[in-house]
Image (cartoon, rainbow, N blue to C red):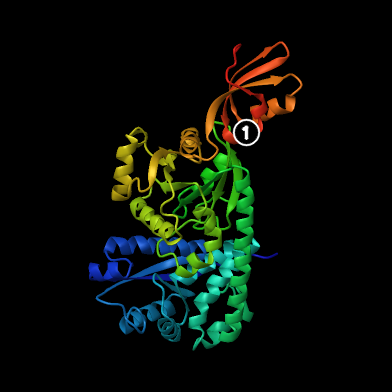
Amino acid sequence: MNSKPPDERTVVVGVGLKSRQVAHSLLTPGTDTDLEESLDELATLAESAGAQVVERIVQIRPALDAATLVGSGKVEEIRNYVEGNEIDAVIFDRELTPTQLRNLERRLPAKVLDRTQLILDIFARRARTAEGQLQVELAQLNYLLPRLAGRGTQMSRLGGGIGTRGPGETQLETDRRRIGRRIAKLKSEIDRVRATRGVQRSQRQAVPLSTVSLVGYTNAGKSTLFNRLTGAEVLADARMFATLDPTVRQIRLPSQRRVLLSDTVGFIRSLPTTLVDAFRATLEEVTAAALLLHVVDVTSSTASEQTAHVMKVLGEIGAEGTKQILVLSKSDRLSDADRIEDLQTMTHRILGETARQNATEAVLVSGQRGDGTDRLLELIDQELKQDPVARQCFRFPLGEGRALNLLHDRAAIVSQKYIEDYCEVVADTPLSIRDRLSEFTVEKCDAV
């Protein structure tokens, strides 16, 4: 009987800079609060990857050390702690340069990883589709390529644990030329995925079904809300990046219009550039969406910062101008007093200056209980301009049951009455259905 391997005992290391101006120029934590929040997130990521975080080490420096990031004195302190506490891995809350990584591996008697490698490892665990696995492998190889020189036996690790999953030992032991060829092949395959998605998107556009995409910070409640709206069973738990591969389902709006709702990977601060580039094919579902549902965890103390990070990634993939509805999720965790607070006041209190960026409306919901989802569907109906809905009168001969069933299935019936050999119906009807039933439309239903 196979037993689960023990969690790796791990130390996480955060480095802050004394100068806030310098810190901001480097887009990294610049205050004690920023550093603690980033380190909290790193610890959560590590636990999602199967680690047991036993210690946090923090250092504030005037500048990053070019050789080891933290300086020789702090490296010695970390080494002593690792040796005295049977530590398996040390994870740094910044991306290490090839030189820093090599030097730290030589001096520390434990596996050394940085934030980027940890995120790549989680993505390697969570990718299930062939497309997701291709994208993860491309990101990992792009990360490994400049780090080949001097890693020696570290490149041929065969054991399990964080940082050893992904392309596999054959890629880790190969030379630059073979990795370069593999990267070129992966890019070609991902380009084919992008082309296939383009064809599928064109086919979808031939039938007027708008696409609505859920976006937001990881663990904001997107998948729980997706399951509530669609009846799907997408994995939804507290682990970061629980959803990696995109999922698309059809939902029906109050007007009876049908739209496609897509659930995609959550964003995160300092999302590695290699991941943004590799997952561009998947993220095209976001850029092609007619409407974004920007999900924000209303209970998070860092909701404003998380929202800013999401907007930054949307800018990187060219989706910053897409219309949004701001979805404040996890309302079931609020107190009764908070739930009755004016929505505009709550939005500004939680998000500050980032409130309502590109968002025309806001709604408070609970994906867990379903609170607010009816209002959310109404807002989606209002904001989507494709396949507009208008009230129309129809007159069906009694033998046209198929056409009448189509109207009942795809439109919101206002009234219906049978008169002699006809059935007259007034319905709020999408344009595409009005076109299909044009032979049955009349200007006025006299008897209804």
* Horizontal side of residue 77 vs 368, given as left or right: left
User: Residue placed at 43% from the left, 57% from the top?
Assistant: 314
Position of residue 79 measured from the top left corner of the image (x, y, whole percent): 40, 81
The quadrant the N terminus occupies is bottom right
User: Residue placed at 59% from the left, 62% from the top?
Assistant: 194
Position of residue 67 measured from the top left corner of the image (x, y, whole percent): 36, 84
The quadrant the C terminus occupies is top right
Position of residue 28 measured from the top left corner of the image (x, y, whole percent): 33, 67
Quick one: label 1, few (<14), some, or many (20+) residues within 10 Å? Answer: few
* Horizontal side of residue 366 vs 437, given as left or right: left
Residue that extends furthest to the right in the rendered view of this protein:
399
Position of residue 328 measured from the top left corner of the image (x, y, whole percent): 41, 43
Question: Is 105 in front, or is 217?
Answer: 217
Question: Is 409 in front, or is 149?
Answer: 409
- Report the label total: 1
Report the amino acid beneath label 1.
Answer: Asp
User: Residue placed at 53% from the left, 63% from the top?
Assistant: 279
- Relative vertical location of residue 287 with respect to residue 165 in this rendering, above or below: above
Report if residue 128 is visible in the image.
no
* Horizontal side of residue 85 vs 234, given as left or right: left
Q: Quadrant of residue 271?
A: bottom left
Q: Which residue is mark 1?
A: 435
Q: Secondary structure at mark 1?
A: helix
